[in-house]
């Protein structure tokens, strides 16, 4: 017999749903992952886990562009802008 897991968490007043622990364990859902909800033409609800794990770029090597950067100071900088406040 195929493995089957059913849970019925309630929808709260803000229309949020908690993913039950058994479902999180079975599907290896972690914080940051997303749930994609899709209603099919026949009215069936399909739910899919979209994995969003940290470290997506961890295997990439950094590129030296010759200038020191500071993301905290540079986050609002627009490329080509000449008037930057210190």
Image: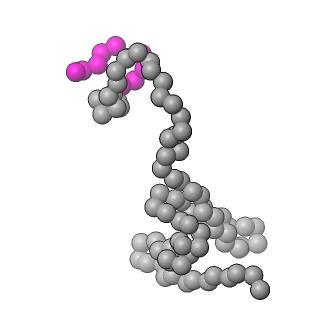
Vertically, is 30 above or below 57? below
Residue 43 in the magenta stretch? The answer is no
Q: Is residue 41 left or right of residue 37?
A: right
**52 or 18: nearer the viewer:** 52
Q: In this view, does 12 lie to the left or right of 7?
A: left
List x then y, in percent, for residue 59: 54, 39
Q: Quadrant of the C terminus?
A: top left
- Snapshot colouring: one colour
> How many numbered circles does the render carry?
0
List x then y, in percent, for residue 76: 34, 30
List x then y, in percent, for residue 68: 34, 21
Q: In which quarter of the image is residue 45?
A: bottom right
Which residue does the image show at 41% across and 15% down from the upper left?
66
Which residue does the image show at 49% across and 63% down from the upper left?
30
Which residue does the image show at 29% across and 19% down from the upper left?
84
Q: What stretch is highlighted in magenta?
A: 77-86
Vertically, is 60 above or below 8? above
**Residue lying farthest top?**
82
Q: In which quarter of the image is the N terminus?
A: bottom right
Q: Main secondary structure of the magenta part?
A: loop
List x then y, in percent, for residue 44: 71, 73
């Amino acid at each position: 017999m195929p493995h089957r897991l059913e849970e019925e968490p309630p929808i709260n007043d803000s229309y949020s749903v908690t993913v039950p622990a058994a479902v999180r364990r079975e599907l290896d859902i972690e914080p940051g992952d997303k749930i994609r909800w899709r209603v099919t033409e026949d009215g069936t609800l399909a739910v899919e886990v979209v994995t969003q794990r940290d470290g997506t770029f961890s295997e990439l090597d950094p590129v030296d562009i010759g200038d020191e950067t500071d993301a905290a100071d540079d986050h609002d900088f627009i490329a080509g802008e000449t008037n930057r406040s210190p």
